[in-house]
Image (spheres, rainbow, N blue to C red):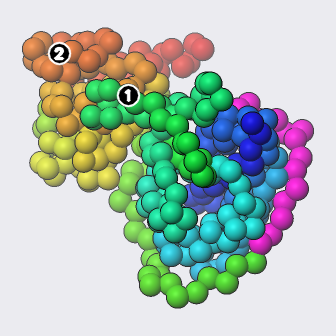
Amino acid sequence: MTRKVLVLGETRDGSLRNVSFEAIAAGKTVAEGGEVVGVLIGQNVSALSAELVQYGADRVVVVEDEKLNQYTSDGFAQALLAVLEKESPEGLVLGHTSLGKDLSPRIAAKLSSGLISDATAVDVAGGNVVFTRPIYSSKAFEKKIVTDGLIFATVRPNNIAPLAKDESRAGEVASLSVEIKDLRAIIKEVVRKASEGVDLSEAKVVISGGRGVKSADGFEPLKELAKVLGGAVGASRGACDADYCDYSLQIGQTGKVVTPDLYIACGISGAIQHLAGMSNSKVIVAINKDPEANIFKVADYGIVGDLFEVVPLLTEEFKKLKVHS
């Protein structure tokens, strides 16, 4: 059964986030050969339309307004609902990001629709679109289908591979005028506490520190390794509680959930709350002085040793490999 599916392209600092392309790939599966329509909401975002098409969107609808320069749930909900009313799609896919987690339930409530959140895989079986999502802090997975109404889902970053970019693809770009009104909140300034560089939730490599880093300065070797590997730095709640780093870096049940290709845990004991945020990483490397640390139970590779000796050695070896590659 072919379907029309809308996919929200999420932007940050004037660029499309990688999860937008992953959402398009998921939208292609949901559409089953039907039309995938990219949606861009913001101010001065129409220039990004071509990239959505190159990654698989058949056409793009753009809603631009100065009131949409910064994300607000009121403003973006009004814009997206207007696009939904005009297009009448059978499916809607967003990234399971901070924006997606805030916006999607609001849209679902307005439409009296169901919502499948945090999907890590999308397949078609027996005539149904089947979404796989983690439950019980990723200790188990469930498969869900939509039996009636809009197929509405959010997809977890770094789990669904985007389609190959095809710069020869072209598609129609249409603007939709929407009156954005009755905003209950206006964003005047955004102060970012997140670390510079690679977005933690989308990073392919994450280097995380726990209480074992001992201080804020203890994160410096981790930052150097992350820089060499083109990755991001994360932390356990213990490190955040100890004021070694900002809570924006926290990974775990009450922090961010990450699924990188490589996760290196440095001085992290492996509390169940932390494992809930990173146990689905493709390859896990644990560095800890305690050979009985719980983190070794989920690690693919373990190094028993002082992180302040091991991490610099790894950094130097990776530098050598990059020089000779």
Q: Is residue 200 left or right of residue 277?
A: right
Farthest front residue in view: 148
Q: Is residue 251 visible?
A: yes
Magenta stretch secondary structure, dominant: loop
- Picture layout, residue 49 above or below residue 229: below
Q: Which residue is mark 2?
A: 305
The magenta stretch is 161-176
Q: Amino acid at mark 1?
A: Phe
- What is the x, y in percent for residue 78? 59, 74
Residue at image position (74%, 44%) is 3
Q: Which residue is mark 1?
A: 141
Dot 2: element = loop
Front-most of residues 161 and 179: 179
Question: Residue 31: x and y, percent?
Answer: 72, 40
Q: Which percent across, then down, holds residue 189? A: 45, 77
Q: Earlier in the sequence, mark 2 or mark 1?
A: 1
Q: Residue at x 60, y 14 (%)?
A: 325
User: Is 164 inside the magenta-drawn segment?
Assistant: yes
Which of discs 2 and 1 lies nearer the camera? The answer is 1
Total labels drawn: 2
Q: Position of residue 262 (x, y in %)?
A: 42, 24
> Which residue is drawn at the image coordinates 55% and 65% (left, top)?
111
